[in-house]
Amino acid sequence: MTEKLSVEERFLNIEHNLEYINSRIAESAEKSGRKRGDIKLMAVTKTVEPIFINHAIDCGIDLIGENKVQEFLSKKEYLKLENCKAHLIGHLQTNKVRQIVSQVSMIQSVDSLKLAREIEKQSQKLGVITDCLIEVNVGGEESKTGIDFSDVLPLLEEISSMSAVSVKGLMAIPPICEEKEQLCKYFEKMHRLFVDIKAQNIDNINMQILSMGMSGDYNEAILCGANLVRIGSSIFGPRLY
Ligand SMILES: *Cc1c(COP(=O)(O)O)cnc(C)c1O
């Protein structure tokens, strides 16, 4: 896109995109034996200006995801969050935990014991319980955030005894795959882990949310068992950095 769109045109695009995405989610939910209501749609709002985020909220979005603590905190006062929750989905450094605890309703990117301990500490200080997902590096990629697949259970056992961190599920970003089949193998691997952990009934660990699937692959993710999809550019258009 080279031409700059007007605010009105972008509003219309957001409306059409949401309509389309909602119908695709419903389709994939049904194909996987579930209903539209079983799948949560998160609008990923990094780099998006509040006016457009608020329009998505007016169109029915009730969950947004931001990547950066600073960006979220600076936009927060302009957002209509009365009926919309916000999750942190980007990599979180321990020195930023103090600023974000109690500002979002969930941290989806917990990927180390050190980080979990800091969330525990800051949550205790504020007297809150912080809901978290464990971010898994399902492809074992060097460059990626997320905890190694084999380290997930040991981490959960440590978190199990924490009083102010509550694990609600898993999050993953699979490697970029040429073939849909390979991509689905990663999604299925995550789903199996999710089901396995659920069956273990670990104290304080509730496997309710499996967060995977973005603009390019949310249908595949739903077919493989995701129940929360994180969609940015397919709602708001390409990101301009
Ligand atoms: C940016 C981002 C998304 C959304 O990506 P799109 O391809 O724009 O849908 C989802 N999850 C995370 C963690 C992200 O950083």
Image (spheres, grey):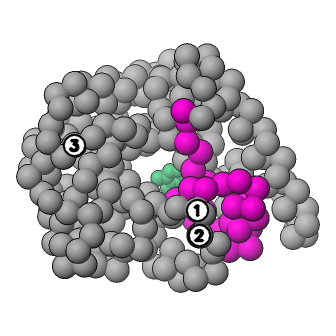
Does residue 240 appear anywhere in the picture? Answer: no
Q: Mark on residue 84?
A: 1
- Residue 222: give x, y in percent of width and height: 54, 28
Secondary structure type for disc 3: strand
Q: Write down the region rendered in magenta.
A: 38-65
Compared with residue 74, is residue 115 higher up or lower down, i.e. above or below? above
* Relative side of 111 to 22, left or right: left
Q: Mark on residue 205?
A: 3
Compared with residue 193, is residue 116 higher up or lower down, i.e. above or below? below
- Residue 144: give x, y in percent of width and height: 35, 49
**Label 2 is placed on what type of residue?**
Leu
Q: Which residue is mark 2?
A: 81
Compared with residue 234, is residue 115 higher up or lower down, i.e. above or below? below
Secondary structure type for disc 2: loop
**Label 3 is placed on what type of residue?**
Ile
Does residue 124 appear anywhere in the picture? Answer: yes
Q: Earlier in the sequence, mark 1 or mark 3?
A: 1
Residue, x 31% and y 37% (percent of image)? Answer: 207
| Mark 2 crowd level (few <14, some 14–19, many ≥20, 10 Å Cα) | some
* Dots 2, 1 in contact, CB < 8 A: yes
Q: Mark on residue 12?
A: none
Compared with residue 142, is residue 213 higher up or lower down, i.e. above or below? above
Q: CA distance from mark 1 to mark 3?
A: 25 Å
Residue, x 74% and y 33% (percent of image)? Answer: 23
Residue 38 position by quadrant: top right
